[in-house]
Image (cartoon, grey):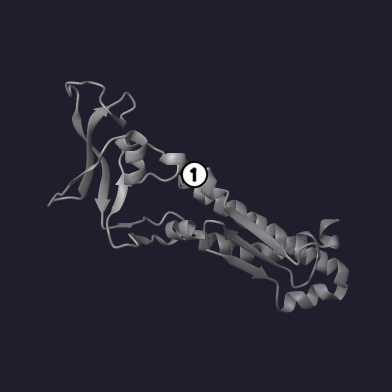
Amino acid sequence: MRLSVTVQGDFVEIVSSSIPEGRRAVTKGVAAAADGLKTAWRGQIAAAGLGPNLARTIRNAVYPKGGTSLRAAAVVYSNASKVVDAFDQGALIQSKDGFWLAIPLPAAGTKGLGNKRITPLGWERRTGLRLRFVYRTRGPSLLVTEGRLNTKGRATASKSKTGRGLTTVPIFLLLPQVKLKKRLELAAAAKAAESRLPAFVLANWPERSA
């Protein structure tokens, strides 16, 4: 989702009667609308439980940079646009290679090597355990390991030489595709920001703000 806003039409003719004040008012108004939309999008992402890091990818820019204009414009965007768009649209995710999508289960832990996304290969390297494919005719297939669960419910290698305490632990769920639930309403927030733009411009007009 990417929003661009410019002021056009009769409103420009009205404010152009006092060019310097009009330029400042329009530019400040556009900047205020963009700031408000950025805050709204970040709030939606945080409320959806998608994490503060993803929320902070929402940025905005106002043009012309370092100047004012009756044709001022603003862009509100995400540095992780594909991820944000997926949750905004409810995207269908499939493996780019046509294989399974490996979804980590609680026993896999929360982080992979170097705090990156958990993958089966990375998980094996991190734990020293081997994964085994289990095909199921009913329900998703699995990648499992032979190990034990620690106090945090994570799979670890057994230290027992006799194999005592070993159990088969599901680590990854294998799915052909995943349909993400739509969790954001970015377009509605963008329309609300556009509707408030004239009020933001008038609020920065000298006679109105005095």
Q: Residue furthest left?
A: 137
Q: Quadrant of residue 19?
A: bottom right
Q: Is residue 194 left or right of residue 110?
A: right
x, y (%) of residue 178?
Answer: 31, 56
Residue in the picture at 39% in, 38% down: 110
Secondary-structure class at tag 1: loop
Residue in the picture at 80% in, 66% down: 68
* Residue nearest the viewer, comparing 60 with 145: 145
Q: Quadrant of residue 37?
A: bottom right
Residue 59 lies, with reference to residue 162, above or below; the image says below
x, y (%) of residue 66?
Answer: 80, 62
* Residue nearest the viewer, comparing 93 with 157: 157
Q: Is residue 181 left or right of residue 171?
A: right
Within-10-Å neighbours for mark 1: few <14, some 14–19, many 20+ = few
- Amino acid on which the number 1 mark rests in the picture: Gly
x, y (%) of residue 184?
Answer: 46, 56
Quickly name the residue at label 1: 51
Residue in the picture at 65% in, 58% down: 60
x, y (%) of residue 97?
Answer: 32, 62
* Residue nearest the viewer, comparing 120 with 5: 120
The number of discs equals: 1
Residue in the picture at 37% in, 55% down: 181
Quarter of the figure with the C terminus = bottom right
Q: Is residue 179 left or right of residue 12?
A: left
